[in-house]
Image (cartoon, rainbow, N blue to C red):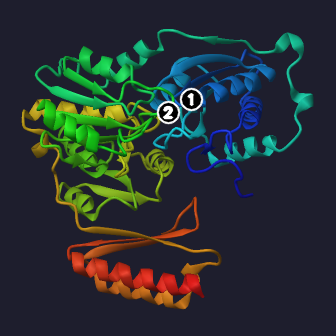
Amino acid sequence: MSRKYFGTDGIRGRANGLITPELALKVGQAAGLVFQRGEHRHRVVIGKDTRLSGYMIEYAMVAGFTSVGMDVLLLGPMPTPAVAMLTKSMRADLGVMISASHNLFEDNGIKLFGPQGFKLSDDVEKQIEQLLDEPIDRRLAQSASLGRARRIDGVHDRYIEFAKRTLPRELSLDGLRVVIDCAHGAAYKVVPEALWELGADVIAIGVEPDGFNINKECGSTSPETLAKKVREMRADIGIALDGDADRVILVDERGHVVDGDQLLAVIAQSWKEDGRLAKPGIVATVMSNLGLERFLEGQGLGMIRTPVGDRYVLEQMLSQGYNLGGEPSGHIILSDYATTGDGFVAALQVLAVVQKLRRPVSEVCHRFDPLPQILKNVRYRSGKPLDHAEVKSAIMDGENRLNGHGRLLVRSSGTEPVIRVMGEGDDRDLVEDVVDQIVNALGHAAAA
């Protein structure tokens, strides 16, 4: 059964296009029915980011959940990892985050978390999908069994204390000038407050959400604003979160961007030295730079690669027993602390290393030189260009030419009719030539 609604990270689309009040209400009903297990009063926590459409979706989901007898606790704007954490700590049967992550305000989405704070498995998502397309009138709650809904206070403080406890008790950020960019998103209150409580000199930007400006020319997908502010304020470090704060990108004191691969290198080496790695290695995706893999090898650490998507990283971490994984985009998963990517907690781990080494961020966060990486997209209308003989030949030829000196990845996008061609290696000209040969072959196949 192919999935009709769920993608790699929940249900996402244009607000009032794909993500309508009707769909949100049905998702509330379907998910509520799937997660009713036992005779106790069932409860769900709902958080959101700062999009205008969040109100519409939130209230529609409240109607859905209460109509099948679930009590609803409304958290208001909160980071995705905070919702996952609170789902477990508040003994909820289900957690919901209303967010389209790093997308602009026109989109929105629904992410669901099980009782332990983990994203749902494919099987559970399929159960929910099945109910979305079935009449469920007869399964609605009786009048006396309807759910209640209320907003709860104090959840910001709970997340701040949780984040602070991921650091050694004696560690302080005294003396560090930090610029934090919250992308006008879900973390706009909690993260600047937490940094200040830890002793940092905090300059906060992207903390004036108006319903429309989330991720707009700010946050982890547009770190130029942060880089400019870091240089202007002569800060030690800049931290850029995305709209729901499950990913992070850093900027050093010179205004240079530090991506997720470098963050993984910093944390992996630090945790290895402190004996905190559960296994001698990390989990990353096929998009992580070969330079990271070689750096880890030099540290005596391995690297398992997964398909693109933090859910695949986490699945591999859990099944293989690793406690560190992530993506170049800044999804960093620290499974000792969190059940999903947590941009702020990842940033704190790096700040701890900076304070320990007492060296500039530009030195601490440059563990390896990334190999030249070329990524090109080829759009097609129909068919399967990857099955074309000319394309297969070009890919085989490219792999032979890069043998031992680089890496080639050709894959179909999971969301649009696009083939992504990525090559990396020691010789930029060679990599570019290999990628161009495959792109040309794909162009011929797409036009055939």
| Residue 156 found in image quarter | top left
Q: Is residue 300 above or below residue 170?
A: below
Q: Earlier in the sequence, mark 1 or mark 2?
A: 1
Residue type indicated by callout 1: Leu
Q: Nearer the viewer, residue 146 or 212?
A: 212
Local packing at callout 2 (Cα closer than 10 Å; few below 14, some 14-19, many 20+) is some
Image coordinates for residue 356, horizontal then vertical, percent: 12, 31
- Residue 405 spot, x, y in % from top left: 24, 77
Q: Picture coordinates of residue 412 (x, y %)? A: 53, 68
Q: Is residue 78 left or right of residue 276?
A: right
Residue drawn at x 71%, y 58% is: 2
Identified at 38% across, 20% down, the residue is: 190
Q: CA distance from mark 1 to mark 2?
A: 7 Å
Q: Are marks 1 and 2 in contact (CB under 8 Å)?
A: yes
Quarter of the rendering occupied by the C terminus: bottom right
- Along the line of sight, the residue nearer the viewer: 410 or 352: 410
Q: Amino acid at mark 2?
A: Phe
Give the structural element (helix, strand or loop) at label 1: loop
> Residue shown at 63%/39% (left/top)?
15
Label 2: element kind: loop
Of the numbered discs in the image, which one, if any, rests on residue 232? none
- Quadrant for the N terminus in the image: bottom right
Asked if residue 127 shows in the view, the reply is yes
Q: Quadrant of residue 238?
A: top left
Return the x and y of residue 438 as percentages of the image width and height: 42, 82
Q: Could you say which is closer to the camera, residue 78 or residue 222?
A: 222
Reading the image, the residue beneath label 1 is: 52
* Between 108 and 35, the one nearer to me in the picture: 108
- Residue 64 as seen in the image, left or right of residue 278: right
Residue 212: assigned label: 2
